[in-house]
Image (spheres, rainbow, N blue to C red):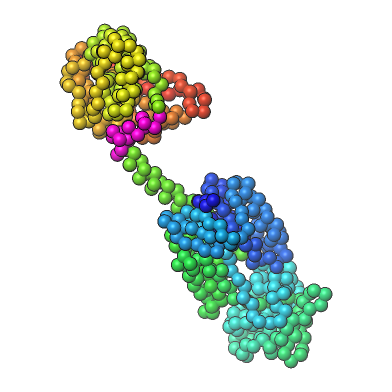
């Protein structure tokens, strides 16, 4: 079955695994697809990797894979044959025909070392045919090293001077290059670096070791290592299908290869990051891993930003729609019962001692509060925006008996547009009626106006501190309120505030743990 990952990493070397590790530890779903063709496979050891110096390349990869999978990342051997944009993500086809989707891509396909055509060169690459003194210089220190000119002479002179740091037995093989310029010849003479003219025809091998090079003239130059500068070509075929093209890389004015252009975080084009040698031909293993880590972190940041934008859009949609009739009907119709069927505890606490009269139950829901009041002799108007809720409430009232049902009038209304009659009720109760700030203040003002002289206004809500608990609360901070905030909206010349407080009460959360939540409770009497 097609699966969608947060990130698919194409290439499982140091860069790809480091990026995948960062993403897996960030709790992202991540898949690494790797063809198993690492550039450094011919090398015996990885060097200059702090803490892992002298580690075999295959061991480093195996350890990296184990770390990625330990945090939930997936590794798959294979190739990504095609990649195409698909909506806000990418659709990938793997060899074998498997299709999957990725929200983001991290491409770490590396590069290909294109060597000059010289018999025997490819077979010795990474062993005693070398190119990087920092990668292999220590291993051939004080040995006989030949630097083959395969490009501009100035580049070769720079290279041979560099290798001179590791051995006094370094020579320059001019191969097919023209005669050295006098300043270059002077440099080499000053550092006692011999110059060997003439084309090199092949390598001399004995007992599976390089012993020298054979010139076209037939002369054999004894060597223990041969340095060759390859052309570094980015493996960019997959990226080109996404509109990402490699650019030439120059050193000393000479094109030495190609790489994928990207910003410092590795972003090549929206949704696609690159890391390692595909984006930096100079990168060694440790810097490739570092770039993978950076790219992985930036991908996570980009995903978080997208998720935040989506959350804000969803939040705004909920605020616009959740208190409309359609939203309430949808909630009630989704389940046979939403509420417990018991009256709200703060209503019981405050109304039990009141003389029965006319009561308005605001947001009467499935009728528990209205029925409780009616059972105690109140004439109740239960008002709700949902016809489904009112139907259930009426059925519950009938089940409680004809006398109880006869004391309740069920009214379908949106109090924002159809406010209750002013001065009509001896008790107005609004239990956990949460609306956006300004709308709430307007509705609460209308509820206060509906209270008759000498009557009681009871408003109870979830205290804002509940959002910091494991209680199941919809996270709408602007819709939460304190009792003191509600009390501040009452005219002190017309009202006596009997209570404006936070009342804790124990409940059991969805995980079965006992916790304490708080109700914001306003009790006020109209003068």
Residue 124 spot, x, y in % from top left: 72, 74
Residue 354 shows in this picture: no
Looking at the image, residue 121 lies above or below residue 88: below
Residue at the (36%, 31%) spot, across then down: 333
> What is the chief secondary structure element of the magenta stretch?
helix
Residue 90 shows in this picture: yes
Looking at the image, residue 4 lies above or below residue 82: above
User: In the figure, residue 293 lies in which quadrant?
Assistant: bottom right
Segment tinted magenta in the rendering: 319-335
The residue sitting at the left extreme is 422
Residue 418 spot, x, y in % from top left: 19, 28
Q: Nearer the viewer, residue 35 or 114?
A: 35
Q: Nearer the viewer, residue 237 or 201?
A: 237
Q: Is residue 334 left or right of residue 94?
A: left
Residue at the (54%, 51%) spot, across then down: 1
User: In the figure, residue 409 lies in which quadrant?
Assistant: top left
Does the stretch in magenta take in 315? Answer: no
Residue 402 spot, x, y in % from top left: 30, 11
The residue sitting at the right extreme is 207
Looking at the rendering, in which quadrant would you find the C terminus?
A: top left
Residue at the (79%, 78%) spot, across then down: 205
Does the stretch in magenta take in 327? Answer: yes
Number of residue marks: 0
Residue 215 spot, x, y in % from top left: 73, 88
User: In the figure, residue 110 lies in which quadrant?
Assistant: bottom right
């Amino acid at each position: 079955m097609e699966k969608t990952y947060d990130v698919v990493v194409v290439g499982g070397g140091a860069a790809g695994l480091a990026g995948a590790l960062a993403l897996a530890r960030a709790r992202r779903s991540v898949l690494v697809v790797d063809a198993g063709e690492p550039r450094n496979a011919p090398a015996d050891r990885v060097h200059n990797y702090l803490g892992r110096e002298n580690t075999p390349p295959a061991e480093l990869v195996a350890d990296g894979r184990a770390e990625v999978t330990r945090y939930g990342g997936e590794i798959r051997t294979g190739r990504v044959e095609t990649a195409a944009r698909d909506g806000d993500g990418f659709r990938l086809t793997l060899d074998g025909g498997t299709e999957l989707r990725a929200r983001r891509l991290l491409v770490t396909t590396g590069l290909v070392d294109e060597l000059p055509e010289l018999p025997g060169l490819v077979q010795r690459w990474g062993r005693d045919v070398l190119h990087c003194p920092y990668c292999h210089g220590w291993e051939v220190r004080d040995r006989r090293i030949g630097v083959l000119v395969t490009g501009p002479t100035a580049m070769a002179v720079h290279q041979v001077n560099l290798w001179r740091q590791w051995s006094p037995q370094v020579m320059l093989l001019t191969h097919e290059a023209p005669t050295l310029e006098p300043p270059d010849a002077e440099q080499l003479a000053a550092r006692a670096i011999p110059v060997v003219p003439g084309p090199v025809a092949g390598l001399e091998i004995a007992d599976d070791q390089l012993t020298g090079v054979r010139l076209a003239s037939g002369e054999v130059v004894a060597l223990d290592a041969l340095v060759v500068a390859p052309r570094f070509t980015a493996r960019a075929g997959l990226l080109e299908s996404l509109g990402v093209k490699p650019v030439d890389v120059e050193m000393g004015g000479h094109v030495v290869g190609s790489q994928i252009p990207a910003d410092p975080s590795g972003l090549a084009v929206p949704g696609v990051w690159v890391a390692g040698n595909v984006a930096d031909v100079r990168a060694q293993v440790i810097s490739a891993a570092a770039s993978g880590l950076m790219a992985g972190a930036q991908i996570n940041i980009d995903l978080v930003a997208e998720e935040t934008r989506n959350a804000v859009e969803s939040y705004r949609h909920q605020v616009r729609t959740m208190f409309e009739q359609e939203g309430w009907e949808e909630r009630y119709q989704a389940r046979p019962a939403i509420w417990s069927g018991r009256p709200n505890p703060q209503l019981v606490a405050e109304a039990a001692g009141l003389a029965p009269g006319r009561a308005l139950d605001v947001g009467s829901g499935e009728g528990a509060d209205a029925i409780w009041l009616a059972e105690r002799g109140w004439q109740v108007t239960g008002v709700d925006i949902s016809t489904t809720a009112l139907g259930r409430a009426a059925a519950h009232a009938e089940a409680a008996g004809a006398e109880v049902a006869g004391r309740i009038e069920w009214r379908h209304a949106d109090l924002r547009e159809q406010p209750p009659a002013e001065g009509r009720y001896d008790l107005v109760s609004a239990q956990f009626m949460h609306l956006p700030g300004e709308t709430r203040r307007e509705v609460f003002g209308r509820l206060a106006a509906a209270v008759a002289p000498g009557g009681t206004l009871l408003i109870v809500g979830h205290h804002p501190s509940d959002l910091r608990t494991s209680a199941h609360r919809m996270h709408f901070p602007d819709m939460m309120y304190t009792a003191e905030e509600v009390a501040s909206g009452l005219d002190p010349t017309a009202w006596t505030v009997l209570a404006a407080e936070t009342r804790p009460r124990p409940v059991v959360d969805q995980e079965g743990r006992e916790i304490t939540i708080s109700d914001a409770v306003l009790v006020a009497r109209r003068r």
